[in-house]
Image (tube, rainbow, N blue to C red):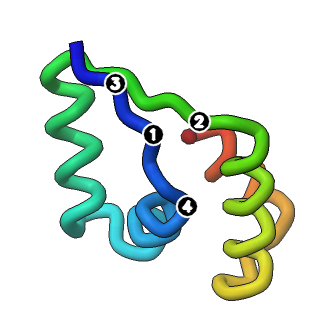
Amino acid sequence: MLRVVFDTNVWVSLAITPEGTCGELLRRLVTAGGEVFTSDVLLNELVRVVRRKLRYSDDEVRDLVDFV
């Protein structure tokens, strides 16, 4: 089984363009039965980045973190 940790940049790219390369990578991983791992450090960085760069609202941030 394939196990991966996506960098924050992958999640940001996925949030911006779900149908793009990162979205395809995630779909293929899940279809193949792979697992995605994360950490509190990565999630905290993701929250900071999407609030600052993408100007996500609290609800949007919560939805993204729940998805990850």
CA separation, marks 4 and 1?
Answer: 9 Å
Question: Relative to 68, is 50 above or below?
Answer: below
Q: Secondary structure at mark 1?
A: strand
Q: Secondary structure at mark 2?
A: loop
Circle 4 residues within 10 Å: few <14, some 14–19, many ≥20? some
Tell me the amino acid under the disc marked 3.
Arg
The residue pinned by badge 1 equals: 5
The residue pinned by badge 4 equals: 8
The residue pinned by badge 3 equals: 3
Q: Secondary structure at mark 4?
A: helix
Q: Quadrant of the C terminus?
A: top right
Q: Quadrant of the N terminus?
A: top left
- For residue 22, side relative to residue 4 (left or right): left
Circle 2 residues within 10 Å: few <14, some 14–19, many ≥20? few
Q: Earlier in the sequence, mark 4 or mark 2?
A: 4
* Residue sitting at x 44%, y 75%: 16
